[in-house]
Amino acid sequence: MSHETIESLLEEERRFPPTAAFAAQATVRDPAIYEQGEDIEAFWESHAKSFTWFSAWSKVLDWQPPFAKWFVGGTTNITVNCLDRHVEGDKADKTAFIWEGEPGDERIITYADLLRDVCRCANGLRALGVRKGDRVTIYMGMIPELAVAMLACARIGAAHSIVFGGFSPDALKERINDSDSRVVITADGAWRRAGVVPLKANVDAALAETPRVKTCVVVERVGRAKAGVEMVEGRDIWWHELVADQPETCDPEHMDSEDLLFILYTSGTTGKPKGIAHTTGGYMVGAAMTHKWVFDVKDDDIYWCTADIGWVTGHSYIVYGPLANGSTGVMYEGGPDYPDKDRFWDIVERRKVTIFYTAPTAIRAFMGWGDEFVTKHDLASLRLLGSVGEPINPEAWMWYHEIIGGGRCPIVDTWWQTETGSIMVSALPGLTTNKPGSASRALPGIHVDVVDEEGQSVPLGSGGFLVIKKPWPSMLRTIYGDDERYKDVYWSKFDGLYFAGDGCKRDSEGYLWLLGRVDDIMLVSGHNISTMEVESALVDHPDVAESAVVGRTHEIKGQAITAFVTMRAGTENTDEKRTEIRKHVATKLGPLGRPEEVYFAPQLPKTRSGKIMRRLLRDIAEGRDLGDVTTLADPSVVDSLRAQYQRHHT
Ligand code: WT7
C-alpha cells in the first residue's frame, strides 16, 4: 500500500501548538518524558508505585512472546485504588459521578456513596454464590448501577463481561455462553430518545439458550409497568431487594496482578466475537496513567467522556481511569438529540464541563445539525477536547476546535483499541504541536512503528501497517479461552510485533496519520487508495456533512470508488451536486480518487458503536442482496440507498 497511497491529501499545513497558558499548567510539560519511556520496565514500574498494593511484585515484566505478565507476584484490588484510598484520604465527599438521566433526573454520587453501593452489591453477589474467578455478564443502559455492578465484580474477584445494551438477544446469548457466565445483571429497560429499550425482555430471550445461567439480577430503572417486565420465579431477583440488607463494607479480594479483571467482546462485524481478556495490575496502571496525562486531569476538573460503558472507552475512561485518579465525571444516560440536538451542550454549560471526550462520528453529526445548537450555549468552561474511535478528518477537527473549543482548547486525538486497554498514540496536550487529523505520536513508554508487508520499518514520509514493538501493561493477555486465535490474529503477521490491523502513514516529521482498518483499502487501477482519504476529501466539500466510501468491482479498474454522502441541512440533492462533489474530490486527490458514483444518504448505516458498516455499503454498491442487518442502529437507512441503486441501474 505504502508508496502508492495517494500523497496529495494529508499534507496538512496547519499547526496548533499548545497555548502558553495551557502549557504552563499542564501535568506533563518536559519533553524528556519520552526518553524516560525508553526503558519500559523502569518507566512503568515508577507509575505502578503510586498505587495501593497488598503485596509488592517481584518482577516488573515477564515477557514470553506473545504472552506478557506485568508486576509479577504483586497483589491488589482495583476497587481499593478507585474507591477506598480516596475515601480514606480526603475525597470521601468528593463527587465521583454527576449522573444525568435522559428524562432529566439526576444523581450526584460521592466517592463514599460509590464505595458503599459497590460493597452492598458485592455482598449481594457473594450471597448469590459468585466467587473469585467466576464471570458475570452485565447488560444495562448508562445508569450508575452499571458502574456499581462492574466495580462490585472487581471487588470480589469475578470478571465482568459487559455487553452493550444495544445488542440483540442473539449477540448477548453468544457472549454469555462464550464467557460461561452463571449470573447476568440487567435493568428492566433503558431510556433512549423517550422510548424504552426492553433490556429485560432481551435477556429473557437470550436466557432461553444459556443453560448455565442460574440468576438474573434486575435494576428497576424505567418502572415495571412501562417495561412490561416478567420476573421468572427462582431465577430473577430485583437489584433493590438483593442489596437491601447487605452490609455497607465488603473485604476486597486480594487479586494477583495477572488475575482476570474483565472480558470485553470486540465489535467486529463478521466472525465469532473475540473475548478480549484484560488482567488487573497492568490494566489499572495503564488506564489511570494515560487518563491523567492525556487529559491533563486535575482535582477540580469536570470530565465528561460521552462513550457508553459497554465499550472499552467507557471501561477505561469513564470508570477505571477517572476513578483511580479520584476525578469527577459526568455520566449521561441518553441520546445527544433528546429532547433536542443541543442536549450535550446544555449539559456542558450547566455542569461546567472542562474536559470533553467524544467520537468523530458524533462530531460530524453535530456539524451536520448546524452551529446554532452549539452557539446558543456558553461553553467557556471547556479547556480540553478529545477524540476517539476512528480517524478524525481535518475539517471535523477544525470545526471541533473552533466551534466547540472556541479556538482555545487543545485536542487530543487518541488512537487505541479494545485490545490495547488504554491510549497508545496521542498528543500530550501541554507538549505536542497538533496537526489537524493526525493522532501525533506514541505516548511515553509505548513503542510503535509503521512497517511494510515484510515487517520492515518504512522511511519517514510513507505508509504501511501500524505495529506495537514492545509489550505494555494494559495489553490484552489473550482471547478468552483461545490462546491460538490470540497468536494468530495479533502476532502471526509480523514476527515479534503486535499487528493492530490499521493502515498508517508517518509524515516527514514522524507524525502518525491513521488510515483506518487495512481491510478498508481499495485497489483502483493498480493504486492503493484508503477509503478514509476519499472520505476526508468528500467532507471537505462545504455541502457534505458525512461520507462513507467503498470499493466495488469494476471490469477495467479492478475496483471503482462508490461514495455515500450525507448532505448538510438545506442543500439540494441534484445530479449537478453529484458532479460537483466528484470534481471536488478529483481536485483534492487527483483523478484516481474521483468516486465513480455518489449516493445521497439521509443517514449512513452504522453499528450501534457508531462504526460505518462498509460490508453493507459494499453490498449496495455491488447490487447484492443485503446480508444480516441486525447489528445496524437503524435498519431503515438502507432502503433509500437501495432505491437509488435501482434508479441508477435500470
Ligand atoms: C479501532 C479500534 C479505542 C476505543 C474505541 C474503539 C479505530 C480508534 C482511533 C483514532 C484513528 C482510530 C482503529 C482501531 N480507531 N481510535 N484516534 N484514529 N482510528 O475501539 O472498537 O476496539 O476499535 O478503532 O481502527 O483499530 P475498538
Image (spheres, rainbow, N blue to C red):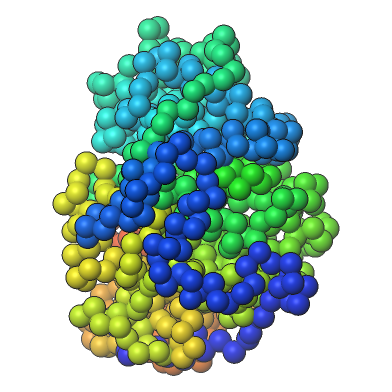
Front residue of 518/356: it is 356
The quarter of the picture where the N terminus appears is bottom left
Res. 562 in view: no
Task: Give the side of residue 281 with respect to residue 615, left or right.
Answer: right
The quarter of the picture where the C terminus appears is bottom left
Res. 421 in view: yes
From this view, report whether residue 466 is shown above or below residue 424.
below
Task: Give the side of residue 515 with respect to residue 482, left or right.
Answer: right
From this view, report whether residue 188 is shown above or below residue 417.
above
Q: Which residue: 53% across, 35% down? A: 80
Residue 164 pos. (x, y %)? 45, 40
Residue 368 pos. (x, y %)? 64, 64
Q: Which residue: 42% across, 83% down? A: 506
Q: Which residue: 66% across, 46% down? A: 327
Residue 533 pos. (x, y %)? 45, 79
Which residue is outermost to the top? 233
Q: Which residue: 52% across, 65% down? A: 414
Task: Give the side of residue 547 with respect to residue 305, left or right.
Answer: left
Front residue of 542/435: it is 435
Residue 488 pos. (x, y %)? 18, 59
> How many numbered callouts?
0
Residue 148 image-quadrant placement:
top right
Residue 621 image-quadrant placement:
bottom left
From this view, report whether residue 240 is shown above or below residue 317.
above
Task: Give the side of residue 345 with respect to residue 53, left or right.
Answer: right
